[in-house]
Amino acid sequence: DKIKGAYDAGSGWLCVFLVGIAAGTFAGIIDIGTTWMSDLRNGICLEEFWFNREQCCWAANSSTDGDEACDRWRTWAELFGDFAPNYNPGVYILTYIMYVIWSMVFATLAVMLVRVFAPYACGSGIPEIKTILSGFIIRGYLGKWTLIIKSVCMMLAVSAGLSLGKEGPLVHVASCCGNIFSYMFPKYGKNEAKKREILSAASAAGVSVAFGAPIGGVLFSLEEVSYYFPLKTLWRSFFCALVAAFVLRSINPFGNDHLVMFYVEYNTPWHIVELIPFILIGALGGLFGALFVKANVWWCRKRKTTKLGQWPITEVLVVTLVTAVFAFPNKYTRMNTSELIRMLVQQCGVEDFNNDLCDYTDQSVLNVSDNLGGAVAGAGITRALWMLALALVFKAIITIFTFGIKVPAGLFIPSMAVGAIMGRIIGIGMEQLAVRWRDAPIFSDLCTVNGQCVNPAMYAMIGAAAALGGVTRMTVSLVVIMFELTGGLQYIVPLMVTVMTSKWVGDAFIKQGIYDAHIQLNGYPFLDSKLEFEHTTIAADVMRPRRSDPPLSVITQDTFTVDDVETLLRECDHNGFPVVVSNESPYLVGFVNRKDLTLAINNAINTQDGVVAASVVYFTQHYTENVVVGGPPPVKLRKILDLAPITITDQTPMETVVDMYRKLGLRQTLVTHNGKLLGIITKKDVLRHILQLENQDPASILFN
Amino acid sequence: DKIKGAYDAGSGWLCVFLVGIAAGTFAGIIDIGTTWMSDLRNGICLEEFWFNREQCCWAANSSTDGDEACDRWRTWAELFGDFAPNYNPGVYILTYIMYVIWSMVFATLAVMLVRVFAPYACGSGIPEIKTILSGFIIRGYLGKWTLIIKSVCMMLAVSAGLSLGKEGPLVHVASCCGNIFSYMFPKYGKNEAKKREILSAASAAGVSVAFGAPIGGVLFSLEEVSYYFPLKTLWRSFFCALVAAFVLRSINPFGNDHLVMFYVEYNTPWHIVELIPFILIGALGGLFGALFVKANVWWCRKRKTTKLGQWPITEVLVVTLVTAVFAFPNKYTRMNTSELIRMLVQQCGVEDFNNDLCDYTDQSVLNVSDNLGGAVAGAGITRALWMLALALVFKAIITIFTFGIKVPAGLFIPSMAVGAIMGRIIGIGMEQLAVRWRDAPIFSDLCTVNGQCVNPAMYAMIGAAAALGGVTRMTVSLVVIMFELTGGLQYIVPLMVTVMTSKWVGDAFIKQGIYDAHIQLNGYPFLDSKLEFEHTTIAADVMRPRRSDPPLSVITQDTFTVDDVETLLRECDHNGFPVVVSNESPYLVGFVNRKDLTLAINNAINTQDGVVAASVVYFTQHYTENVVVGGPPPVKLRKILDLAPITITDQTPMETVVDMYRKLGLRQTLVTHNGKLLGIITKKDVLRHILQLENQDPASILFN
């Protein structure tokens, strides 16, 4: 018995432990698979085709010697033609074509798999998980098919070079693991509320493995995903995220020991003056975010309402083709998006002598320090700036059309890329300003003795946070994710200032982040806990029946017959019925679920001898005087009666009602006046009421 | 009108902005004051006595030359006697005496100020703030006198060399600022629930300035202090913590640009094998925490129940004397506790050649790298280990007696010091093991090529987290604080593992952290949201009146006279009364507050013509047939009636009831059966019921 108690107490921890292991494993496999497939677009490892480029070259012991030295790795151009190795138009065109073809192949596979096996595997999944955690049930959304297909298609979609990331989908994958494992523990599998605790922890693990940011994951789950997050869930999420991060680190898919994806090594202090460009970056990030949300929602609504929505496969192929064709010529869009971000947040050093971004005229500073930042920009930087500007515009536009197509698609990496490009450009601008006017009082603090003035890489990091903040409206979790991602702990104040600015500017244009916007777009019944409800309506204004409606369908506790109940069930599609003392004195006794009632009545008819249509159904504890001696035997249903329904009075302000719905996770409340039952308010009524007050169409809400 | 709306929306942000500035300013002043007073125990700056040692020497342009070169700073020995500068017994004794005298002076001042001006300024304040945030009101606890006296006495208590920190009290100081500023904004000052939002943000700012850890502060507020923490409060706390950290950074009390207190510079990776000692450290930290909580609560209870509690000033003086006398001879206890921690978490480097902790036999590694860790320990380390072990025992014991005396006292720094000493000792042990058996398979990974094996400084950092975790049972917030404190982001997994172990081990011995234990010790009415309520009692078991009690005092809606009401108010001390339809049909109409009722009745008697004792009091909307034509004029009190009291049925499980109390912050609920009023459950009843189920004395709860 004691062991059973200990198992019961420990089963929650055990469950999140398993979820953590599964999430870490899936993330590791997906990372390895994505690298391999991405490299496949460029070439193949001749002898061991299952190796990616790095492993292939590493196996040949030549990884350290740079690009050309690895002879076991063959690009497609090398395989198919005997071209001269230098810049040959033929090589370029062949590489281009192979790049496009592979992209199309991957995208086709991804969209076909999603269409055929698991339609729920598309998109990022975060809006749906938010909705599920708020109490809505979407059957199959977190099933094993979704898990498998989403994992596979995520690799395909990323490898296809589409402007999307695998971070959001990883949260979905981790939540699927959470859902599947919770069935191993009846305490969690059989109780939706308990299962949501596991799902909250699982989504923390998802972000933990997506970014190698366990704390950020916990905060993401708290700030963005979860609806109800008690301390116990906080601890379990923490543990789950830890296990997942640890497993991923052991698998070590990137081949380096850092848990950190975009590790930054610079240690340059920031100056108060620089808060001005940081706030500017924050404002631009917020603006970008708001525009992105508006444009993306507009496009998704267009897809839903026009014929476009009937051609999802074609849409994916067109988007892939456009992406591949435009991305290849620009080296900043051709590379993997996360590699682009890594490059942008990295400071220039001695080894970057042939990197355009680090082409400063005064190459002599190379000898003074590891840093080139202080010098005047050379031609390479001008070229890089143009290319980056083009990449910025392209990425920003194509992502609008990509987020929402029928493949797994995350938003984190593309938004961060846009932001990082913007940040780097502004950073280089600031640097050049400071270099040219290094004696101006405003810039005098910025330049240190060894010639370094401003660190544009830091601006890229700040920019990434600003854009992501504008799109998702995350704050604390974003800052934590950013410094777990980069290790740039000393930039916490600039990051916080930027993210806060970004959120405010974004909120000024459109109140919702992308996830909330998609929840509304899809009409999920989600009661946003962020919005303040400040109206003066009362429960009587919202409840059903309205004044002109027919009276509420109720069951009396000791006069309804089996026939009456069956008629009620046939004529009325409510999910449940209040039980009252009698029609004359409608005092509330309890509430009975439709499902339970149907089952109990059928059960009574089939198994209880002598039950006929005229049998009286009793919800009372004892028989009352209504029992006719010699009449048909009564049906006793007190045990299916919920004796503790939540009730409110008709004068209760809707503010309080909304608060109760949010905090207690209610589905309906009964409305009384001086003890008498007046009506009922369901979650649907509350949601409709809120939409009506916001002058939006209340019919757009979806219900299951 | 629009401006008013914008001001209304922005006033919350403005308020937390001001709170952040105030918290940062107070923290800066306190930091500067503490350094000055601490240094005063050793000597004085001759020409400018208001300078501390560092500023004094810096002003003389000789700060960089080390200890002896500063001639404007005079130690007391130098001032009072013309001793030879070397180790002279006279110098030692004089220094010792001055150290003890100054300590006693500071401690006397501190305790007198607290006793005379602000008794609430003692202790850490966190248990009380937790209670206040859960809805209890302690008048004057967050007032301006508490603020001023606590700030002053905090400096005095820390300077007295007592084993306490200023981190907890800083949270109290910040909360006082929050309380004071909230009165500038009627929206917050006049509404207790709204004010609590500001207080949550203020406590985040408190930790933010205490450790230079803004994110850690937000999480501390979320995990440890706040009761109800919606997303809006999260954002405001984030902003408040940011502002406070920024202001503190601008004041720059430590004179270095790092926001980070114990910045660690090492970058050594950790190895999987090391998780074993980390888990050991976590377990020891949890054990220490549990023992500390038990011992401290035992001592505090002793103080409360015996005569000891009548001599608070003597107690403080005795503790100070004992601390000063025992602390001086050991250099690790003589130094400032936070300096001790800083030293312990710092790796040995070239500049530490005369530091005992870095006395390795093989000094040649100095030339190879900055690191001495790989060498065999010399005599200095053995000496240091003995001193540290003594310091550990002393600190652990004296802190038990210190936390609870009548001066402002925080627990963070002393617990971290105990943990850091323990961690460093275990770290050196591990290091020596690995050095001696460097070829054993288990250690083979640990030693790198340049001779470094294990980094004992990292163990000290881990140990600090373990001990603090054991004492407070924080998890996520502690990990974040630790890495904001040290910048050791790559140690996130070891830190998480250790903190989790520490919490589990601690929970196995005693379920409560120190703050919860003190809440219970003081009998504050705090409904812990962490504990799961898993009993099968129902509302009918808990509600008043019990079966044997006289019936519930109710008011009928249209038959009570003024006289009846006055009798009821005289004979019954309830805080409020339910209003029912009539005595025969006790259906609930509403709830009326005692205060409102008294006021309204007095008002009616004094201002309304013709109201006599026989006047009928009406709570109905319209006059009913009871109005006797020609009788005394009725008193209409519907407007003071709360028409939307929260009701539950008698069959509601107490689990649900407790959940509603926690989430909705209720003070009472009315219990009905089929619409009829049966009884009432107050928060007091719920708390008593929980204590009874835990076999504790339900009479120990305090109420205001």
Image (cartoon, coloured by chain):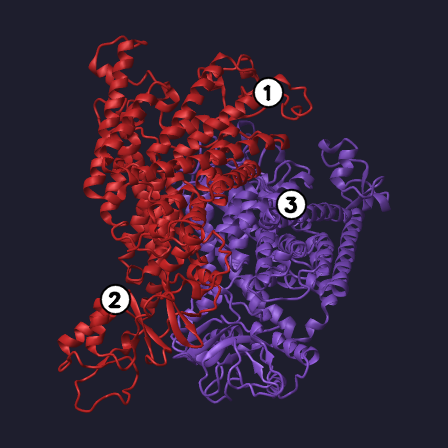
Chain colours: A red, B purple
- Quarter of the C terminus of chain A within the rendering: bottom left
Q: CA distance from mark 3 to mark 2?
A: 74 Å
Question: Could you say whether the residue bearing mark 2 is in a helix, strand or loop?
Answer: loop
The amino acid at mark 1 is Leu
Which of labels 3 and 1 is toward the front? 1
Label 2 chain ID? A
- Residue that mark 1 sits on: A433
> Which residue occupies the extreme bottom position in the image?
A629
Tell me if residue A338 comes above or below residue A210 in the rendering: above
- Residue that mark 3 sits on: B339
Disc 3 and disc 2 in contact, CB within 8 angstroms: no
Task: Please state if A550 lies on the left or on the right of B426 as rendered.
Answer: left
Q: Are marks 3 and 2 on the same chain?
A: no
Using the image, tell me which numbered label, if any, was put on residue A99: none
Which of labels 2 and 1 is toward the front? 2
- The residue that appears at 46% across and 57% down in the rendered structure is A231
Name the foreground residue: A317 vs A198. A317
Q: Dot 2 surroundings within 10 Å: few (below 14), some, or many (20 or more)?
A: few
Q: Position of residue B27 (x, y in %)?
A: 68, 48
